[in-house]
Amino acid sequence: MKIRWGSVAFFKRLFLGMLLLAVVVPSVLSVAFGVGCARLRREAETLKTENGTLSGRLEEALSEARGAESAMERADAQLKELLEERAQADAARAREGGIDYQTLYPDLYCDAEQGEEEPENTVFLTFDDGPSERTAEILDILKRYGVKATFFIIGKNADTERGRELLRRIVDEGHTLGIHTYTHVYREIYASVDAYLEDFNRTYELIYEATGTKPTVFRFPGGSINSYNRGTYEEIIAEMLRRGFTFYDWNVDAGDAAPGGGDVYDAVVSGCRRQSRPVVLMHDAAGKKDTVGALERVIETLLEDGYGFGRLTPLIRPVSFSYKS
């Protein structure tokens, strides 16, 4: 039978349908909600359990880290203690072995770059035993010809106001300022390594205070090997080299320190012509008038011969004596 809109049968069926929905839908939703809540509770319990496990592991890791840090601190303290003991033991061994001088004058070291340069056709003029009243005259001549040289000074000769002025002038005009000890008294300075270091250090400090520069080169009075240091020269040389300083002997002698003097010009020029790398020993001490008088002629002749002039630095390969028994 066909139901028309607005008939009694239509409204009955509509009522029954709505009643069914009102009963069934809430039940279905209630069941679904209950299932969802149960699932969420299970997941929450699982997360809680996992979180507890992770928290425990994190606490264990933090405890291990604190233990490792403490162990590192203990190891560091032990290492420092061992290093201190080693330093004390080394110092004790040095004293027992007779090399306690290595601990003397901790600032008496040279860190200048060293080399083995051997410039060709270059003459190295060196002047020992100054400064004196002759030093200014020599500086004037060198300046006139644009020549650089090396001055190995005696500390006691420079330990005056005028002496310090000359040291500053030597440095300011581009020459090398080296050490030739303080006293130049052979028997005293070569008595032991300690004695040599004490004397050397006095001049080192004097030069530094006067000029603000630290000497890097030096010359032994009488040369590195002489009749006064036969028993000590090996130790003294070894210690000075260990401290980084460079020493220079000579292969041309002007002869201006010999009694009565000599022909300085001929000694220097002929000596330079025989050497491939001349290092000339001259003196600017008081009374060495032959040196000043011959210097201009020496420079002019060597320039005509094609030589140049240089100053000694640690980059220049040293000229040194060899021992002959």
Image (spheres, rainbow, N blue to C red):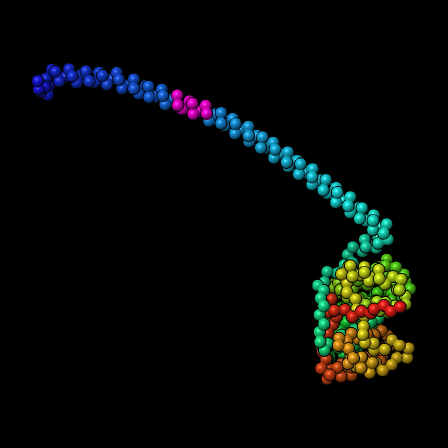
Classify 180 as above or below 92.
below
Q: Is residue 57 above or below residue 133?
A: above
Residue 125: horizontal and vertical position, in percent? Answer: 77, 75
Asked whether the viewer can see residue 232, the reply is yes
Asked whether residue 295 appears in the rendered view, the answer is: no
Q: Residue at x 71, y 66 (%)?
A: 115
Residue situated in front as seen by the camera: 178 or 192 = 192
Q: Quadrant of residue 63?
A: top right
Does residue 39 belong to the magenta stretch?
Answer: yes
Give the magenta-colored segment's residue range.
38-46
Is 89 colored magenta in this rendering?
no
Residue at 39% across, 21% down:
38
Task: Name the spot of residue 285 as percent of width and height, x first.
Answer: 85, 73
Query: Total label count?
Result: 0
Q: Residue at x 18, y 16 (%)?
A: 15
Q: Which residue lies at the image location 75% right of the left edge and 41% below the top edge?
A: 81
How far from the left and from the top, in percent, is residue 152? 80, 69
Return the residue found at the far front. 325
SS assignment for the magenta stretch, majority: helix
**Where, quadrant-wise, is the C terminus in this rendering?**
bottom right
Q: Is residue 213 above or below residue 259?
A: above
**Quadrant in which the N terminus appears:** top left
Measuring from the top left, give residue 294's x and y in whole percent.
81, 82
